[in-house]
Image (cartoon, grey):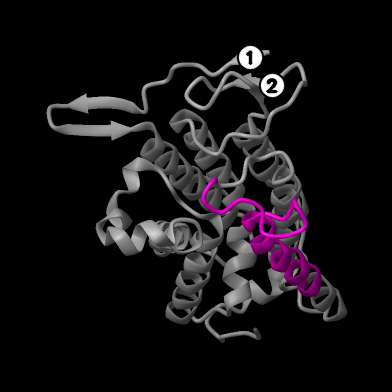
Amino acid sequence: MLMYPDIDPVAVSLGPVAIHWYGLTYLFGFIAVWLLGNLRARKPGSGWHPEEVADMLFYGALGVIIGGRVGYMLFYQFDLLMQDPLVLFRIWQGGMSFHGGMLGVFVAMWWFGRKTGRSFFQVTDFMAPFVPIGLGAGRIGNFINGELWGRPTDLPWGMVFPFVDNQPRHPSMLYEALLEGLVLFVILWLYSSRPRPLRAVSGLFMLGYGLFRFGVEFVRQPDAHIGFLAFGWLTEGQLLSAPMILFGLYLLVIAYRRGEETVRNDMAGTGNGGKQ
């Protein structure tokens, strides 16, 4: 049995200004995406320029922060949002929805694609392999904040969260950091290291994240004010992840049926709009 470490969520205090670990994990994720994107952009035939990665990251960061926060409040804290609309802006308190952030990024990448003459999937196929690093960093931020803990367990790595109760629980935020972060990154990085059909990398990301998140939800404690939605086990996270699994499979099938459109060839045609 493990004990949750007593971690101060504030990393640095500078007078009235407090820098939270949660925010620093997001900063780490954005920097990692920028570095990895530059690495891929410099590969011969990538069809991307390093300076474009910074622009893409700016659009993506806006999508993550705005979509993630709005999505969290709408999906998980709607009643609180109605009572106190200003809670929407208290990001330092934690509370970001991946699914809301994903929708925000979709809008941002569509907008970025229009600005650069690329199709939506040209942009998302390039970006998808880097995203898990940010996801994993965000889950570490959840762990430091002491949120999104798991259900009781008798496994030897069960962790007691003393601010919840004295029962050993699954450290589900660490499971997600491992699966949605490290494991999904390795899978996507290796898969995308060779030319793939347009939509395939995006589809594999959707499928992989959806499966990992759906699985971890079986040991993650559902939000107390939401509970189980149906069957005594279906959670809000699973309900939101199921369409990702189906859409990811759909994109992979479509991609390989149109296998002549490889990611690299399509990116080499930057500026012509491409197919969506």
Query: In the rendered structure, does residue 246 fall within the stretch colored magenta?
Result: yes
Residue at 43 percent of width and 62 percent of height = 78
Point out the stretch of residues depicted in magenta.
224-251
| Residue at the limit of the structure toward the left, as seen here | 15
Residue identifier under label 2: 158
In this rendering, the answer to whether 115 lies above or below 48 is: below
Query: In the rendered structure, does residue 179 fall within the stretch colored magenta?
Result: no
Do residues under tags 2 and 1 come within 8 Å of each other at their CB atoms?
yes
Q: Is residue 236 visible?
A: yes
Image x and y of residue 134, in percent: 53, 45
The amino acid type, in three-letter code, at marker 2 is: Gly
Q: CA distance from mark 2 to mark 1?
A: 6 Å
Q: Quadrant of the C terminus?
A: bottom right
Q: Quadrant of residue 229?
A: bottom right
Residue at 54 percent of width and 78 percent of height = 118
The amino acid type, in three-letter code, at marker 1 is: Leu
Residue identifier under label 1: 2
Label 1 SS: strand
Image x and y of residue 194, in percent: 77, 57
Q: Is residue 45 visible?
A: no
